[in-house]
Image (spheres, grey):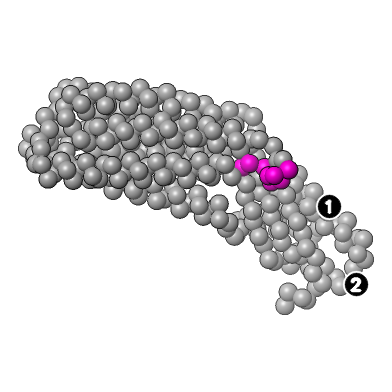
């Protein structure tokens, strides 16, 4: 289960600030080279990198908001701010992709050939290395924190690294194919739309609510069975996720003649057990044995 400590939360902020600074520097380099060469692919890639900067700022804000404690208006905390941040990132990617698509089509219609130079090769190569490095670090942080927002940011970095690599290959082919720059712009667009959709779908799926997976249910069953030595015939699982805060409700079956006070004490003990061992806030409903059948 996801149990964040202060160090892991600091890791998220480090990833956000590091990404923001490095992307801003890369944006300036790419835009400069794109302007002097007239390459729509390089200029589009520069704005793609700037969107990474904006998404990193969103990440930082999302982590800050998600750490706010529960209050009267938000009794379950602010953990879903992280999911909202991921959806914002996906939206930014989609907007950038639309701009790329329009510019690439115009490039092909005008049959404009771009002449790249040494500066374009050097800057694009630097971008590939830096962006892949940022992606690796973001994937590491996302796995450490089990954060969808950081995972989204990692794919944002990876998409930029891949598009820069494609553009780098196109630089060496530009002398042979006049249409290479526009075609690369379209390839970049398709890749960006794919990543944007995956990030949006995964984050919105959790935000709308999802059923617990079998692994989580098995872990809960194992904890309770190890404690009581018996299977409570658990069913009707429901999961509510708020960042690293999980609310789970389910039913268990107890003997129909069980004393009400004893049943209450037993379920409260089981709820405390799940809170301590799995960091889950559980609400357990009691059914008389046989009702589930």
Give the distance between the C-alpha atoms of the residues marked 1 and 2, in whole angstroms.
20 Å
Label 2: element kind? loop
Q: For residue 67, say whether it is visible.
A: yes
> Which is nearer the N-term, disc 1 or disc 2?
2
Residue at the location (78% across, 63% down)?
Answer: 285
222 or 264, which lies in front?
264
Residue sitting at x 69%, y 66%: 235
Q: With 125 as the anchor, is 81 left or right in this view? A: right
Query: With 98 as the anchor, is 172 left or right in this view?
Result: left
Q: Nearer the viewer, residue 271 or 207?
A: 207
Measured as percent of width and height from the top left, residue 151 is found at: 47, 41
Q: Which of the 4 image quadrants contains residue 53?
A: top left
Compared across the picture, whether 100 is left or right of 275 comes to left
Q: Which residues are magenta?
A: 72-79
In the rendered view, would you say 24 is above or below 193? above
Q: Nearer the viewer, residue 247 or 212?
A: 247
User: Which of the numbered marks, if any, corresponds to residue 257?
Assistant: 2
Location of the C terminus by quadrant is bottom right
Name the spot of residue 232 as percent of width and height, x first: 77, 64
* SS of the residue under disc 1: helix
**Left or right of residue 65: residue 70:** right
User: Pointer 2: residues within 10 angstroms few (<14), some, or many (20+)?
Assistant: few
**What is the number of the mark on residue 269?**
1
Residue 96's image quarter? top left
Residue found 8% across the figure and 34% down from its top: 175
Task: Identify which residue is drawn at 39% across, 34% down.
Answer: 52
Q: Is residue 76 magenta?
A: yes
Q: Which secondary structure is most common in the magenta stretch?
A: loop
Q: Is residue 254 above or below residue 227?
A: below
Q: Position of residue 177 (x, y in %)?
A: 8, 40
The reply to whether residue 144 is in sight is no
């Amino acid at each position: 289960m996801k149990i964040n400590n202060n160090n892991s939360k600091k890791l998220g902020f480090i990833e956000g600030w590091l990404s923001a600074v490095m992307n801003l520097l890369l944006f300036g380099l790419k835009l400069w080279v794109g302007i002097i060469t007239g390459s729509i692919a390089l200029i589009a890639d520069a704005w793609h990198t700037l969107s990474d900067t904006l998404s990193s700022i969103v990440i930082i804000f999302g982590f800050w908001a998600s750490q706010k404690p529960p209050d009267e208006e938000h009794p379950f905390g602010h953990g879903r701010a992280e999911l909202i941040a991921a959806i914002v990132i996906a939206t930014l990617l989609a907007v950038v992709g639309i701009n790329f698509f329009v510019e690439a089509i115009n490039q092909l219609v005008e049959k404009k050939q771009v002449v790249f130079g040494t500066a374009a090769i050097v800057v694009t190569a630097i971008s590939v290395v830096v962006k892949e490095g940022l992606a690796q670090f973001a994937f590491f942080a996302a796995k450490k924190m089990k954060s969808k927002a950081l995972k989204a940011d990692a794919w944002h970095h990876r998409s930029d690294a891949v598009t820069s690599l494609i553009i780098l290959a196109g630089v060496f082919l530009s002398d042979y194919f006049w249409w290479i720059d526009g075609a690369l712009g379209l390839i970049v667009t398709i890749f960006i739309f794919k990543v944007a959709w995956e990030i949006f779908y995964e984050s919105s799926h959790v935000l709308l609510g999802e059923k617990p997976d079998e692994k989580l249910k098995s872990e809960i069953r194992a904890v309770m069975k190890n404690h009581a030595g018996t299977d409570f015939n658990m069913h009707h699982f429901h999961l509510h996720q708020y960042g690293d805060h999980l609310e789970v409700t389910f039913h268990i079956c107890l003997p129909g003649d069980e004393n009400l006070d004893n049943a209450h004490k037993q379920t409260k003990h089981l709820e405390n057990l799940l809170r301590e061992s799995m960091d889950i806030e559980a609400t357990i409903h009691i059914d008389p044995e046989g009702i589930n059948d």
